[in-house]
Image (cartoon, rainbow, N blue to C red):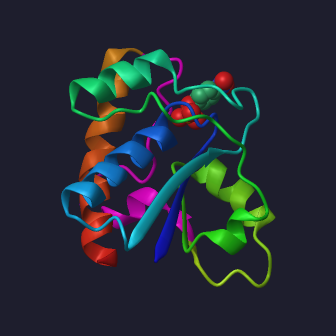
Amino acid sequence: MKKILFVCLGNICRSPTADGVLRKLIVDAGLEKRFLVDSAGTGDWHIGRAPDPRTIKFAAKRGYDLSVLRARLVTQDDFDEFDYILAMDKSNLANLQKMKPAHFTGHLGLFMDFAPHLEYREVPDPYHGDAEDFERVLDLVEETAQHFLKKIV
Ligand code: 4NP
C-alpha cells in the first residue's frame, strides 16, 4: 500500500481539500486497498478542528465531504509512515525539508509539480481570500490530483 500525506500551513483549507479530492478519486476508481490518504499542517493554531467552514462549503458543492476531517500537526513519525509527502506551497516544503530525517526514502516535494502544464507551482493560500480563492484551490487540486493518481497507479 502507498501512503500519501498532504501538508499545508493550517490544515484547514488546502491540504484537507487535497485529502478529500484524492480520497474520492481513489474510492471512485476502486483503489482504496492500494492507497491511503491523510493531511496535516506545519502550524498548530487549528489542531483538532474541522476544516474552515468555507473549505467545507465549497468542497461540498462539488461532492466532497470534508466535515469529518480534523486538523493535526505534521510529525517526525510521518516520514516513517508516508511514501509521498506533498506540500501545497514552497514555504511549507522548506519547513518539511528541515524536518526530513536522513533515512527518509519517500518522495517529498510540491504537490503541483505533478501538474507541470498548469501555470501554478503552489496552491495559493485562500484563508484571507474570498469565494474565488476557495474555488481556485478546488480547481487546482482537482486537476493536479487526477494527474498525480495517474502517475502513481
Ligand atoms: P491552509 O490555510 O494552510 O490552506 O489550511 C490557512 C489556514 C489558517 C491560517 C493560515 C493558512 N492561519 O493563519 O490561521
Residue 88 place in picture, x, y as percent: 51, 49
Magenta span: helix, strand or loop, mainly?
loop
Residue 94 falls in image quadrant:
bottom right
- What residue is shown at x 35% (from left), y 32% (from top)? 65
| Residue closer to the observer: 100 or 29 | 29
Relative to 94, is 16 above or below?
above
| Residue closer to the observer: 145 or 113 | 145
Residue 38 place in picture, x, y as percent: 53, 53
| Residue closer to the observer: 10 or 32 | 32
- What residue is shown at x 27% (from left), y 56% (from top)? 27
Horizontal side of residue 61 vs 22, given as left or right: left
Relative to 71, is 111 above or below?
below
- What residue is shown at x 20% (from left), y 55% (from top)? 28
> What range is drawn magenta here?
108-129
Relative to 143, is 3 above or below?
below
- What residue is shown at x 41% (from left), y 33% (from top)? 66
User: Quick check: which quadrant has ligand 1?
Assistant: top right
